[in-house]
Amino acid sequence: GLGAAGSQIGDRRPISCCALGARSEIVATGSFSGVAKIWRRDNFEAAFELAGHTDRLVRMAFSPTDGSVLATGSADSTVRLWRVPDLDPAHSGSDEASEPSPRALAASQTLSGHALRLGSLAWHPMGQHLGTASHDHTWRLWDVDTATELLLQEGHEHKVHALAFHPDGSLAVSGDLAGVVRVWDLRSGRAIASLMGHAKGVVCADVSVDGQHVATGSLDHTARIWDLRKRNCVHVVAGHLSLVSRVRFDPLGGGHFFTSSYDRSCKVWSTRNMQLLRDLRGHEHLVMDIDVDPSGSCLVSASYDRTWKLWCAP
């Protein structure tokens, strides 16, 4: 099981989002200050600082096909794309006074077009396209190489806060703050299903690696697991005492499902019967976000308490 591997104060302001990717030596975090940072996983030191957004960060993710490309989404209604260089050789501890300051990076692209703040972003699994969900009631698909908008999808009557893609790239799942979840066929641009059941707004979504299930997290304090073929809810995960801020399936298709919540906890569940396996506690305030590395062996959490924590299997 996962256990605490370390903690770091990430910013002067609360940490709002975090990401792990294919490059196992780095962790990314984003803050209410609008600044993202890249951290060394071996010594928890900041290696790079990514400044450019003008409002707090809401979601970040590494590209599924290039572990050096990071997308950050902000309440300033834009996405910025960053190319993270290789790390310098590890700082030797001989000169204790001169802890290296993080190098400043500039964004390689900016995706702008949404009229209001972003709720979420998600990479299309092929890696050339990025999806964004916004409080302007739309979600959009972008070509990251040319920074052009390919698709503007209407159909929600409320603020869209959640977005995820099917692993084969054929479907998108979006969720809004009225609790409506829609499944979209990307070829036709049509909504092919609505998943109804949450009592309050949906703030996060994920699709299992086998493509059979959708997970959603809500302001109603529950996560729900939906069967994508039958289009019905198969599990209500009711173990949290506050908003469920992030839901993540095991990236290798193992038997685990991960949640974070404003109740200050992260939880690990069995996908077979949704029994609680681990209750990861240590944050002193809202857990805003979690991410799982591609091997499924580490989880990072971001909190309003201004820290990020790493939880790893021994």
Image (cartoon, rainbow, N blue to C red):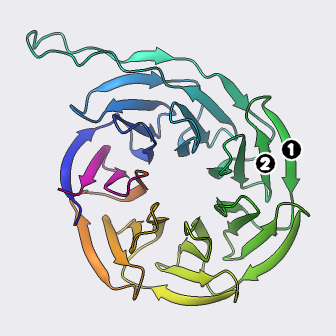
**Amino acid type indicated by mark 2:** Leu
Residue in the image at 74% along x and 47% along y? 116
Q: Is residue 269 visible?
A: yes
Q: Position of residue 16 (x, y in %)?
A: 45, 47
Among the 4 quarters of the image, the one containing residue 299: bottom left
Circle 2 sits on which residue?
141
Q: Position of residue 177 (x, y in %)?
A: 66, 69
Q: Position of residue 256 (x, y in %)?
A: 38, 72
Residue in the image at 69% along x and 26% along y? 109
In the rendered view of the protein, which quadrant contains the C terminus? bottom left
Among the 4 quarters of the image, the one containing residue 136: bottom right
Q: Magenta stretch mostly in which secondary structure?
A: strand
Looking at the image, residue 134 lies above or below residue 98: below
Number of marks present in the image shown: 2
Going from N to C along the chain, the mark reached first, 2 or 1, is 2
**Amino acid type indicated by mark 1:** Leu
Tags 2 and 1 in contact by the CB under 8 Å rule? yes
Circle 1 sits on which residue?
150
